[in-house]
Amino acid sequence: MVETKQVPTEKNPVGAAVLSAIFPGVGFFYIGNAVKGIAYILIFASLIVLEVESRQAGEHVVFGLMIAGFYIFQIFDSYNEAKKASLREEAVTNGREQLSLFGSVLILVIGVFFQLAELDIIRYRDIVKFWPIILIALGARFIYTYSLSSKEEERESGGEK
């Protein structure tokens, strides 16, 4: 009888980062998080469409900086996710990968803006005026994460503060 041993597959963080540098979001497919990979591809494509559709010089700068910032962010994110994946098992629930609530809301908001632009309710160039919503959402997420970690620390310490 041959004994088989299950060895956890380690994901190379540098490989994930290189794949994401070649094409944004692909590093997450390598890690095994297809949902996040698709989300990042959609976000990147949306930023490119917004940059192409912008007509004023100031809009080009804003969207260009957003594209550059997101491009660099997703490379570091894929590196860190691959590092985490090699240290622990993937977070899979009922065969589905978990996507953060923040990522889901971000995709929903981008979809709403594009639909409003397609219905001629707003123009693509008007979307640039909504970029501060991203900062508001990030701030709200940081506050929520901080409050969760504070509550968790309080439970671990036995409710003493």
Image: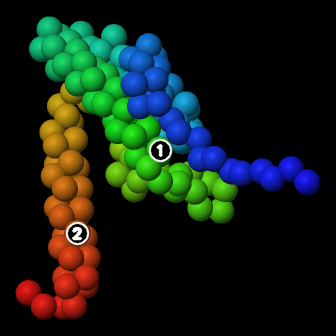
Residue sitting at x 22%, y 69% = 149
Q: How many marks?
A: 2
Position of residue 93 relative to residue 51, above or below, is below
Can the viewer see residue 26 in this picture? yes
Q: In the image, residue 69 lies at what x, y percent?
A: 23, 24
The C terminus - image quarter: bottom left
Viewed as shown, does residue 21 lie left or right of 55? right
Assess disc 1: are there few (<14), some (14-19) or many (≥20) residues with their C-alpha within 10 Å of its C-alpha.
Answer: some
Sequence-earlier tag: 2 or 1: 1
Q: Nearer the viewer, residue 116 or 33?
A: 33
SS of the residue under disc 2: helix
Disc 2 versus disc 1: distance between alpha carbons? 23 Å
Which amino acid does the dot numbered 2 rest on?
Ser
Residue 57 location, x and y as percent?
14, 8
Q: Which residue: 21% across, 76% down?
A: 153
The location of residue 10, given as percent across then percent down, is 53, 39
Q: Where does label 1 land, which residue?
A: 86
Describe residue 69's horizontal placement relative to residue 35 as left or right. Answer: left
Above or below residue 132? Residue 104 is below
Crowding near pointer 2: few (<14 within 10 Å), some, many (20+)? Answer: few
Disc number lying in front (2 or 1): 1
State the residue lying farthest toward the front: 1
Report the colour scheme. Answer: rainbow
Amino acid at circle 1? Ser
Q: Which mark is residue 149?
A: 2
